[in-house]
Amino acid sequence: MNTKRKNSLYYRQKVLLALLEVFGGKLGKTDLQKYLFLFTQEYQKDKSYEFIPYKYGCFSFQSVADKRKLTDIGIIKDTECWEIAEKSDYLAKIATEDCENLILLRNKYKNIKGNNLIRDVYRRYSYYAINSEISGEVMNKREIKILERKKPSQTNYAFFTIGYEGKFFENYLNRLIKNNVHLLCDVRKNAFSRKYGFSKKILSKTLEEIGIEYTHMPELGIVSEKRRSLNSQADYDRIFHDYEFCTLKENKIALEELYNLFRKYRRVAITCFEADSNMCHRSLVAKAISQRPDWEYEISHI
């Protein structure tokens, strides 16, 4: 076991281990997701994890990624369930408030497991059940009707831009889901990120699983060499001027393709890194497409 790596855990990972500890050191994967969700929703202001509506309700991709890391360094066993491999006082490694609240969580929910736990979460947090494959097994007809009304149903044409800087993967996905985006167009030159979830392979696969299509349009990106040494507003002004009046003009075919995709899918988002669209070239893509003589649609930065 790598002691150095074990001592460099993120705080959220310590919370995850402490939660496992208060529930006896072992939980099934669905129960773990539900308990972790309830803890973040009911006891944490600054949430350790965020969740999306997925196949069995609320689900955190980040928690599963953390499980892989914790398994690699020998803290969690390499099994389907979540099980601590080596006993330790994980509660002592988190803030007192979180420690006390985890104990409150356990005392409140320790006798609610399996379908009863799923049903309880679905009834009180119905948004997170909208993509569930098992809602019919745990909810009655009236509850299913309520659930159906929670599903995003916007069908009007809408063009969005979205960045992922400073956000959990789940936060990003929820913005797409709630706006009923049908297609995500990645306008990064290189669709790679050190931040979990945002490299092309994982991003496209996850979107497919939640019913959103993905396409990469590198022609509309900015080469990495030009993005270096952006230290002032003048630097950004220079690179954006070059992008707007050179790159976009040289890639009119790609802009036309983007417009055709928008007409086909009706609700489309373009994505890049920066949180502020004004500091990102995607705002210039949106500006360029909105200058078409036949453009009459809403553009939103989400």
Image (cartoon, rainbow, N blue to C red):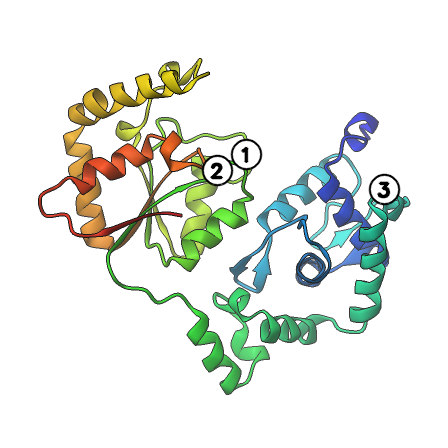
Q: Residue at x 56, y 78 (%)?
A: 137
- List the residue tagged with mark 3: 93
- The numbered mark at residue 198 is 2
Q: CA distance from mark 3 to mark 1?
A: 25 Å
What residue type is disc 1 on? Lys
Of the pair 91 and 26, the residue shown nearer to us = 91
- The numbered mark at residue 195 is 1
Determine contact: label 3, label 1, CB under 8 Å. Answer: no
What residue type is disc 2 on? Phe
Determine contact: label 2, label 1, CB under 8 Å. Answer: yes
| Residue 191, percent from left and from top | 40, 31
Crowdedness near tag 1: few (<14), some (14–19) or many (≥20) residues, C-alpha within 10 Å: few
Residue at disc 2, secondary structure: loop
| Residue 60, percent from left and from top | 60, 52
Rendering quarter of residue 166: top right
Residue at disc 3, secondary structure: helix
Of the pair 49 and 24, the residue shown nearer to us = 49
Q: Considering only vertical position in the picture, is 4 above or below 106?
A: above
Q: Considering only vertical position in the picture, is 193 above or below 261?
A: above
